[in-house]
Amino acid sequence: MGRRLGQHFLIRQSVLARIADEACPEPGATVVEIGPGRGALTAHLLDRAARVVAIEVDPVLADYLRLKFQHRPNLEIVAADVLKCDLARWAPAAVAGNLPYYITSPILDKTLALGPLLTRAVFLVQLEVAQRLTAPAGSRDYGFLSVHAQLFASVSLLFPVPRAAFRPPPKVDSAVVRLLPRAPDPSLPDPAAFLAFASLCFRHKRKTLRNNLLGPYPKEALDALPAASRRAEQLSIPELAALWRALPPL
């Protein structure tokens, strides 16, 4: 079975078992698996979860999975693009999977949008992405992706995964991250508006906040705020939120 969509399949059983344990630490859960491929992680999830919903975009792989797991009644295979699926239909649920780099951000967006319907998310991603997701303010890797993920979840880099754990081996290192949903921040009643502001703040990482925000916000308002002279990567989420509240609404 060929790599029709550029997949690198995780084959190391010890790593697969650790991912499944993190995604389903207690029996009775529903787990939505994104991109099951040939079902290596699926097999481990089926032994732990009450129900596994495996969303596979490749129809050839979906048919293969139906045959491979035909005797497992707790598996539902959905042949579809995950970005076109309503994940809430299977919620509350955990979400897990090996995320291709080119759609990591939209899948994270879709997963975090579940809000309280998300019990946890455990993803295998490129190490660079894992470092960005977990980066603290002031670090080189801190950016909009960090703010977006950490606004809605407590994000942990659980462990690295070597290239040799895949077939074929990728050209970059990987890591497993866990996202545990946070309660909504009462000081941010409109998270979407705040994220739009944060996106402007990180538009050009080497520029100051004043330069990034000038245009949408008036010069006089920015000049009155000392924080606007700093770069976005230097401000924590609470500091960015305080700056947003201090500026006139758009």
Image (tube, rainbow, N blue to C red):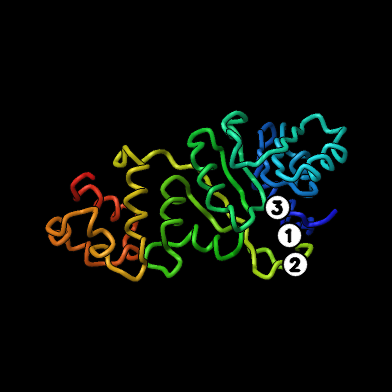
Q: Nearer the viewer, residue 193 or 226?
A: 193
Tell me where residue 53 appears, x and y as whole percent: 70, 35
Assign a secondary structure to mark 1. Answer: loop
Left or right of 137? Residue 31 is right
Assign a secondary structure to mark 3. Answer: helix
Q: Which label number is shown at residue 58?
A: none
Which of the two discs, 1 and 3, labels the residue nearer the N terminus? Answer: 1
Between marks 1 and 3, how big is the CA–CA gap? 18 Å
Left or right of 28? Residue 191 is left
Image quarter (top left, top right, bottom left or bottom right) of the C terminus? top left
The residue at the point 78 percent across, 64 percent down is: 168
**Residue to which mark 1 is pinned:** 8
The residue at the point 64 percent across, 53 percent down is: 99
Between marks 1 and 2, how big is the CA–CA gap? 7 Å
The residue at the point 22 percent across, 60 percent down is: 214
For badge 1, the amino acid type reads His
For badge 2, the amino acid type reads Pro
For badge 3, the amino acid type reads Arg
Q: Which label number is shown at residue 18?
A: 3
Q: Is residue 51 above or below residue 33?
A: above
The residue at the point 74 percent across, 39 percent down is: 48
Assign a secondary structure to mark 2. Answer: loop
Between marks 3 and 2, how big is the CA–CA gap? 19 Å
